Image (cartoon, grey):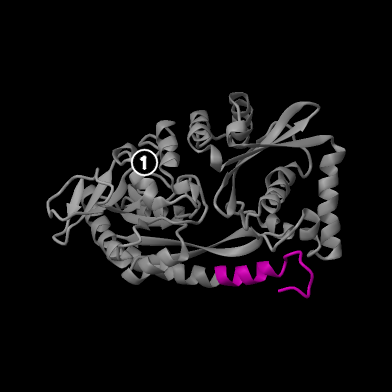
């Protein structure tokens, strides 16, 4: 499907990532942020993790520019000037920017909130680029084209809204200027302040907080638990079998099925080996827990974890402390540990703002949500400031 303008821009909606060449997509997505890679969306789709049945029907956007006003061809690499992931959704699962109350309000008024459009990385609350534009193009023109085309398509399909989740701040501001209202959230991030070792990192802590972390880590050593780091091609099928067992357990204990299938992990293992770090916890020669992270150009993204044996502080060690040590060793500047988790503050993860944008078709609901977001933003900004006061660093530090 496509929507054309006389100024030679052509916007295409794709119902599969396979409809655009991987090189064309990746030339715009770049390599710094792993979740925008064509291979990542391909693995989600071909593992049946993102389908109409799971509520994540691909509807990605490709924009091209051509000298021929009526050209429908998107095969020419020179013509592709912008890309944006988009999904047609019939639920709000796996998004991490919560709008369940909005859906309830629609239902109480006898209206349908679903389907909706979502521009996001499925099951991945990691801020990063969402609209990738060629460097020789006017990004504002692309944003305006999207702002015109998405509501038009929404009207055709009976879609209630369009949500852009965890974009970069500049993207959020550009959309907000066009009228796609913004929303503020808060996550916890670790920053590398030129640390030479984990002890160097702990040296920033107050004495009591430093002792607490060391006690937590000693508990794991006393339990006889060791850790194994596997990067990319070192991860063998047997490792994926073990890890998926751990990953499943985090959902099954809550009576839920996991978002991702085992095939997803095998596919990214083959197509994105340079972006993968698997930390496995071992006791008496047997794997008991694991955490999978994705590696960006300067950031480690902690994503999935699970265990089959419970030990005090095992989660913190496997998911946080081992990741921090890896970042220090490799010189990565940031560790994005994902959504939620106030327990991260005491372990040196700093409260940072995140962003999203929301276009609501219904004018009265748009106004009501706008008022809600204004009040929510005041709370989030106050929360961020207060949360920072509980960081474990010495009082003299900012």
Picture coordinates of residue 46, whole percent (x, y): 40, 32
Picture coordinates of residue 323, whole percent (x, y): 68, 48
- At 56% from the left and 71% from the top, the residue drawn is 381
Picture coordinates of residue 152, whole percent (x, y): 22, 56
- At 35% from the left and 37% from the top, the residue drawn is 52
Q: Is residue 274 something one can see in this rendering?
A: yes
Provide the residue designation for mark 1. Answer: 22
The answer to whether residue 144 is left or right of residue 384 is left
Q: In which quarter of the image is the N terminus?
A: top left
Q: Is residue 119 something one can see in this rendering?
A: no
The answer to whether residue 281 is left or right of residue 1 is right
Examine the structure image and report whether residue 47 is included in the region drawn in magenta.
Answer: no
The answer to whether residue 37 is left or right of residue 223 is left
Is 341 or 44 nearer to us in this picture? Answer: 44
Examine the structure image and report whether residue 389 is included in the region drawn in magenta.
Answer: yes
Q: Quadrant of the C terminus?
A: bottom right
- At 84% from the left and 43% from the top, the residue drawn is 219
Q: How crowded is mark 1: few (under 14 residues within 10 Å), some or many (20 or more)?
A: some
Q: What element carries label 1?
A: helix
Is 295 or 23 nearer to us in this picture? Answer: 23
Picture coordinates of residue 163, whole percent (x, y): 38, 56
Q: Give the range drawn in magenta.
A: 380-398
Q: In which quarter of the image is residue 189?
A: bottom right
Q: Is residue 230 above or below residue 373?
A: above
């Amino acid at each position: 499907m496509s929507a054309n303008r006389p100024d030679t821009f052509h916007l295409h909606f794709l119902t599969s990532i396979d409809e655009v060449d991987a090189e064309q997509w990746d030339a715009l997505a770049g390599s710094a942020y792993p979740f925008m890679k064509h291979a990542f969306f391909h693995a989600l789709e071909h593992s049946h993790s993102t389908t109409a049945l799971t509520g994540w029907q691909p509807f990605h956007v490709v924009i091209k520019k051509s000298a021929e006003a009526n050209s429908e061809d998107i095969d020419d690499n020179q013509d592709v000037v912008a890309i944006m992931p988009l999904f047609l959704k019939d639920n709000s699962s796996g998004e991490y920017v919560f709008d369940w109350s909005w859906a309830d309000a629609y239902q109480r008024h006898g209206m349908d909130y679903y389907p909706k459009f979502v521009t996001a990385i499925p099951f991945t609350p990691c801020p990063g680029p969402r609209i990738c534009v060629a460097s020789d193009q006017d990004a504002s023109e692309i944003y305006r084209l999207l702002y015109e085309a998405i509501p038009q398509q929404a009207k055709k399909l009976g879609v209630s809204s369009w949500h852009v989740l965890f974009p970069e701040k500049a993207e959020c501001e550009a959309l907000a200027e066009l009228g796609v209202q913004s929303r503020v959230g808060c996550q916890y991030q670790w920053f590398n302040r030129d640390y030479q070792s984990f002890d160097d990192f702990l040296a920033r802590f107050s004495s009591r907080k430093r002792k607490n972390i060391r006690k937590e880590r000693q508990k794991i050593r006393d339990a006889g638990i060791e850790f194994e780091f596997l990067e990319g091609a070192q991860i063998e099928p047997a490792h994926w079998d073990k890890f998926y067992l751990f990953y499943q357990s985090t959902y099954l204990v809550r009576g839920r099925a996991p978002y991702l299938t085992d095939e997803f992990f095998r596919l990214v293992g083959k197509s994105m080996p340079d972006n993968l770090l698997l930390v496995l916890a071992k006791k008496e020669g047997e794997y008991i827990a694991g955490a999978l992270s994705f590696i960006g150009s300067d950031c480690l993204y902690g994503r999935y974890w699970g265990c089959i044996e419970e030990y005090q502080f095992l989660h913190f060690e496997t998911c946080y402390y081992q990741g921090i040590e890896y970042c220090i060793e490799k010189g990565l500047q940031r560790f994005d540990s994902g959504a939620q988790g106030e327990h991260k503050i005491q372990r040196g993860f700093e409260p940072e703002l995140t962003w999203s944008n929301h276009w609501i078709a219904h004018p009265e609901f748009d106004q009501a949500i706008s008022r809600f977001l204004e009040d929510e933003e005041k709370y989030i900004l106050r929360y961020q400031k207060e949360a920072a006061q509980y960081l474990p660093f010495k009082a003299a530090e900012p």
